[in-house]
Image (spheres, grey):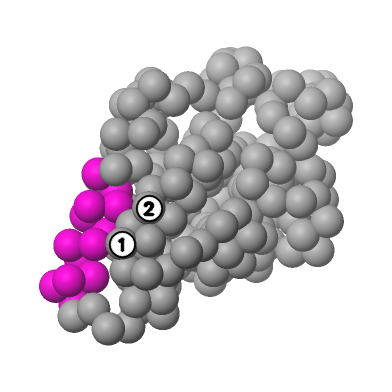
Amino acid sequence: MKLKALLFDLDGTLADTDRLHEQAWLEGLAQHGIKGDHAYYQTQISGGLNPEIVRRLLPQLSEAEGEAFLAQKEARFRELAAGVGPLPGLGELWNWAQSRGLRRALVSNAPRVNALFMLERLGLKFDAVVLSEELPAGKPDPLPYRTALEQLGIGPDAALAFEDSPSGVRAAVGAGLRTVALTTGHRPEALEQAGAFLCIADFTDWHLWDWLQSHDPTAP
């Protein structure tokens, strides 16, 4: 089946924001006596759902205190991300998809307020926006990607997913999607082990464009 849609994660995929989330998380956790580093962030936080992370790392907090912690953490992230821009090549990929009538969906574990903030910063509009916090299960569960496919009215063989974390890759692959991984925050080996068929630094990678040209829906 010809390519009909592109499905994108947000943080670390559309923009290099993982380092900003890492800073916001580690600053917040330090206030509770947890001294984390990059390895801690990658193994304990990256790709996870905020409420689950707080319950696991800060079990002493009440539900209200956990929500307040997350609100402060996300406000700090938005402060840090005020000047963030898209990953190199995203504009070209976006125009390529638009000129070929490909639909685009956002599939993210990000809270809605952050997702809307980032989409406004990047100037992007999607045909579907699926957020894990609004579903019974989030990544690494395949449900968010399956929901996006349902909303677009297509099967997984007609779409390509872009992710940046092992958790996200597992979710996309679990939904039957061919998945390209951005190496903005994790080693290629970990992303390939999760199921990515291609790892790229950004959207200018010629391997990606070679694949896209070979699956161009407008090609005879």
The residue beneath circle 1 is 31
Tag 1, which secondary structure? loop
Asked if the residue under mark 2 is in contact with the one under mark 1, i.e. CB atoms within 8 Å, the reply is yes
- Span colored in magenta: 63-75
Query: Image point 34% across, 76% down: which residue?
Result: 58
Position of residue 13 in the picture relative to residue 29 (left or right): right
Determine the image quadrant of residue 166: bottom right
Asked whether 58 or 82 is in front, the reply is: 58
Asked whether 171 or 57 is in front, the reply is: 57
**Mark 2 crowd level (few <14, some 14–19, many ≥20, 10 Å Cα):** some
Q: Could one spot residue 65 in this view of the protein?
A: yes
Q: Looking at the rendering, in which quadrant would you find the C terminus?
A: top right
Say if 208 sits above or below 64 in the image: above
Three-letter amino acid code of the residue under disc 2? Glu
Query: Image point 23% across, 78% down: which residue?
Result: 61
Instruction: Inspect the magenta stretch and tell me whether residue 88 lies in it.
Output: no
Tag 2, which secondary structure? helix
The residue beneath circle 2 is 27
Asked whether 134 or 150 is in front, the reply is: 134
Three-letter amino acid code of the residue under disc 1? Gln
